Amino acid sequence: MKSSLKSLIFGAILGTMAVSLSSCGGGGGGGGSTYGSYSSPYVSATSFVNGLNNADNAPSYDESFILLYTDETLRSGDDWFVIHDAKYGEDKAVSLQYIRSIIYYDYYSNSTGLAEEFRDIETDDILFGDINGDYYGDDYEVVDYDSWTGTYVGRNSGYDYEDSEETTDVALMAAEKQKKSFIKKAAAVSYAYSVGIETSLSLVSLGYKVEKAINKGKGELTAEDQTAILGDLEKLTGKTFAEVLESATDNAKKDALIKDIASKLGTSAQNLEDRILPELFNIK
C-alpha cells in the first residue's frame, strides 16, 4: 500500500514538474477557469508536442515526437526545435518564441489549447498556399533531412538546423546555450515566486533532469531515475519522502514541514503553500 501511494504521489509530482519546472510553468500555469484569451509564455518543446498529440487525437503508435531540442539546433534568432509531425508525415522546425506568443481562447492556459490554435494557423497557411510553413519560415517550416551533410534543412528559409561537421563546436555552443537558458529560466522563477537564484537554479535543473528522463523512457521513469530524482528532491527540500508521507495525515506536522521547507528554500511558509506548491508542483 505504501509503495503504491509513493508511486502515485511521486508520479503526480514528476508529471507536473516535467512540464512545469523545466519551462517555468509548462503550458503557462494553471490560472483561473474564465473563458478568454490565453497564451503559454513558458511552454516547453516537450509540452507543445504532447499538446499536438492530444489535439490530433494521435494513437500511441503514431505520435509526433522531438528530433532535436533547442539546445541541439544552431539557427540563430530564436530557440528552435525540430519535430517529426506524425499528422502530416513530415519533419518541422518550430520557433519556441513563436509558439509562446500564440494567443488562443480557452478556459485556462494549457498546451492542448495552444496546439489546437497552432493547427488552425497551420491550416490557414496551407489553404493560403504556404504548404511548407509560414512564407519565409520565420515561425515554423517543414525541413528535409540531407543525408549527405547529415543536417535538417528548412524548405522556406534554407537554414541548416545543425552542422554535423562541427560537432565539437556544436557541443560547446549547446552547452553555453543551455547554461544561458537555465539562468534565464531561473531568473524568471526567482522573480515570480520570490525565491533566491540558487534555489531557482536547483528547481529548473531538477525539472530539466526529470523531462530528459521521461523523454528517454518514452513517458516512463526507470527505478534508477526515480531514486536519483527523489534524492534530488530530498536534498532540495531537506526532507525525506517518509517525512512528507507522515505529515500528510497530521496537520501539526504538515505545518512544521512547510515552515522547514520554506526556510530551506529561502521563502515564506505562506508563499510556499499558496503559490510554489500549487503552481510549480500542482500540490494543493
Image: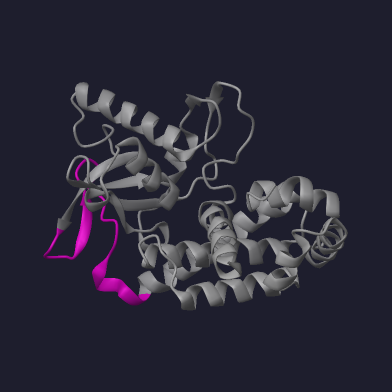
Q: Is residue 88 visible?
A: yes
Looking at the image, residue 246 sits to the left or right of residue 71; the answer is right
**224 versus 116 height, above or below:** below
Q: From the viewer's perspective, is 170 left or right of 252?
A: left
Q: Residue at x 28, y 33 (%)?
A: 134
Instruction: Classify the position of the N terminus by image quarter.
Output: bottom right
Q: Identify the colour scheme used.
A: one colour
Q: Position of residue 60 (x, y in %)?
A: 27, 50
Asked if residue 19 is positioned above or below residue 201 in the image, the reply reads above
Which residue in the rendered view is the most extreme toward the front? 1
Residue ranking furthest to the left: 148
Q: Position of residue 63 (x, y in %)?
A: 27, 49
Q: Work out whether residue 75 or residue 147 is closer to the camera in this orientation and state it.
A: 147
Question: Can residue 138 be seen?
Answer: no
Residues rendered magenta in the picture: 146-168
Q: Residue at x 70, y 72 (%)?
A: 242
Q: Is residue 183 magenta?
A: no
Q: Position of residue 26 (x, y in %)?
A: 53, 47
In the depicted structure, whether residue 105 falls above or below residue 209? above
Q: Nearer the viewer, residue 75 or 262?
A: 262
